[in-house]
Image (spheres, rainbow, N blue to C red):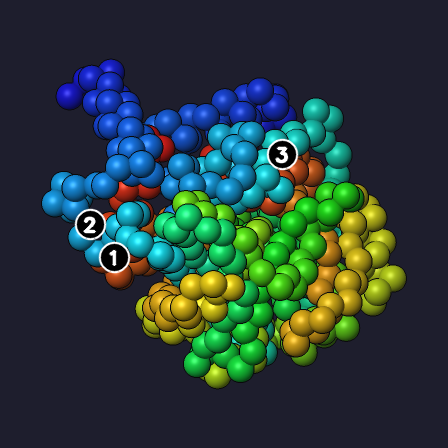
């Protein structure tokens, strides 16, 4: 039996509330922004504890009828070999779409992933680039050298990445800017939890605290 | 101590902190009562900055982002209109936000409003100071200097500690080696207990 399949959204929210009130495990302590000065409306406790803005104030979505995670066909590893999502079977895996030249949103998500690695070390993470122009296999090879051992990055042709994103309902677009840093990519910043059997179970919105995700993984 | 008693005490402490925060905006605080003597006095006249931090950046090719809370203790609105830093050739102000499709997008902005007697909060997923063309990778434990430019107030230079990659909730954890920030974080904990 896989207990997580019975996890309902209310239960997931209850887990969040528990994480926020437990006095023995200060893992979900608030960020540097005091509540009294937060610039955003805390529509959900989960969002309020991260200090992240309302963009992250949507609740995790738990699949009521989990399906096999779309396989991300035709994507490639930094060494040029074909990416194989099924190789992650046996480990809970968190998948997200982003780009390396993202200075704010993606590093915040990666920070939470590092928290998950600490609390649930069996977890793997896969970063799918939506910016193949800059995220070449060569660039990802260098970048991933600095990343956690449990963290992998993949890229591909623009067409393959678009198909992969569509399979997960991920939206992304290139945005031209006036910035010296060049163009940016707008992108859905959700995290997808895939269980050991390759089932896509939970979608976490941007800003979901590591402690909440790790608690779900511990219940798998 | 029974959990219920402990929770009551924590709740009481939280209420006390909440009240002191509320009073802080209208009445002078007793500095001696606060153990984080390094913390900015909320009643300090003019513009003050607290909780500044940036993230380690492993590659100079990638921009960094600095975050902080800027308080305007004057009767007039002001705005952060620019910044410079010896750590980066180019410093810009950017804002992340969610677009109509639910995607996170980032745009350069000309200013961050700092209303009179209020905070401007620069945080992940919102306003941030982008450090472009880094002089060298930002390493954990370093501090970088960032000079803030305002529409009205005089420029101000703040020291911004570089933190290791990690979850937001852990920022009061072991990775912090700056007493100033640890103390401030400690207060935040009490606020939300």
Q: Residue A133: x, y in percent?
A: 77, 73
Residue B180 is labelled as: 1
Question: What residue do we see at 43% from left, 81% from top?
Answer: B86
Question: What residue do we see at 41% from left, 30% from top?
Answer: A20
Disc 1 packing (10 Å; few <14; some 14–19; many ≥20): some
Confirm or deny contact between disc 1 and disc 2 (CB under 8 A). Answer: yes
Q: Residue most toward the left? A: B32
Question: What residue do we see at 46% from left, 41% from top?
Answer: A38
Residue designated by label 3: A58
Residue B11 is labelled as: none
Q: Mark 1 belongs to which subunit? A: B
Please say if B146 is above or below A66: below
Disc 3 packing (10 Å; few <14; some 14–19; many ≥20): some
Q: CA distance from mark 1 to mark 3?
A: 33 Å
Give residue B190's quadrant in the image: top left
Residue designated by label 2: B36
Residue B190 visible to an observer of this rendering: no
- Left-right relation of B176 to A77: left
């Amino acid at each position: 039996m896989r207990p997580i399949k019975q996890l309902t959204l209310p239960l997931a929210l209850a887990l969040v509330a528990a994480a926020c009130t437990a006095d023995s495990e200060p893992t979900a302590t608030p960020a540097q922004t005091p509540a009294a000065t937060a610039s955003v409306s805390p529509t959900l406790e989960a969002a309020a504890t991260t200090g992240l803005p309302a963009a992250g104030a949507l609740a995790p979505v738990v699949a009521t009828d989990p399906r096999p995670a779309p396989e991300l066909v035709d994507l490639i590893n930094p060494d040029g070999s074909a990416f194989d999502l099924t190789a992650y079977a046996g480990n809970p895996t968190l998948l997200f779409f982003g780009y390396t030249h993202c200075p704010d949103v993606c590093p915040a998500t990666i920070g939470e992933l590092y928290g998950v690695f600490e609390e649930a070390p069996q977890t793997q993470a896969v970063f799918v680039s939506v910016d193949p122009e800059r995220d070449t296999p060569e660039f990802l090879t260098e970048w991933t050298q600095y990343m956690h051992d449990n963290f992998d990055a993949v890229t591909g042709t623009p067409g393959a990445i678009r198909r992969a994103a569509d399979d997960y309902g991920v939206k992304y677009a290139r945005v031209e800017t006036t910035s010296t840093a060049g163009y940016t990519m707008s992108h859905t910043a959700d995290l997808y939890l895939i269980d050991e059997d390759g089932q896509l179970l939970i979608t976490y919105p941007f800003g979901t605290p590591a402690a909440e995700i790790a608690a779900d993984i511990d219940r798998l | 101590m029974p959990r219920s008693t402990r929770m009551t005490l924590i709740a009481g402490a939280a209420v006390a902190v909440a009240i002191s925060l509320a009073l802080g905006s209208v009445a002078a605080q007793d500095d001696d009562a606060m153990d984080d003597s390094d913390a900015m006095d909320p009643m300090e006249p003019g513009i003050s900055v607290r909780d500044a931090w940036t993230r380690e950046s492993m590659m100079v090719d990638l921009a960094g982002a600095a975050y902080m809370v800027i308080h305007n203790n004057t009767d007039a609105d002001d705005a952060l209109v620019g910044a410079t830093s010896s750590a980066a050739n180019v410093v810009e102000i950017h804002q992340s936000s969610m677009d109509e499709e639910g995607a996170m997008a980032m745009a350069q902005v000309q200013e961050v409003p700092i209303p009179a007697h209020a905070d401007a909060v620069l945080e992940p997923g919102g306003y941030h100071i982008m450090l472009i063309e880094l002089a060298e990778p930002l390493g954990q434990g370093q501090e970088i200097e960032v000079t803030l430019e305002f529409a009205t107030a005089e420029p101000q230079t703040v020291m911004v500690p570089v933190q290791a990659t990690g979850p937001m909730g852990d920022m009061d954890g072991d990775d912090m080696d700056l007493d100033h920030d640890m103390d401030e974080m400690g207060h935040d904990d009490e606020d939300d207990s």
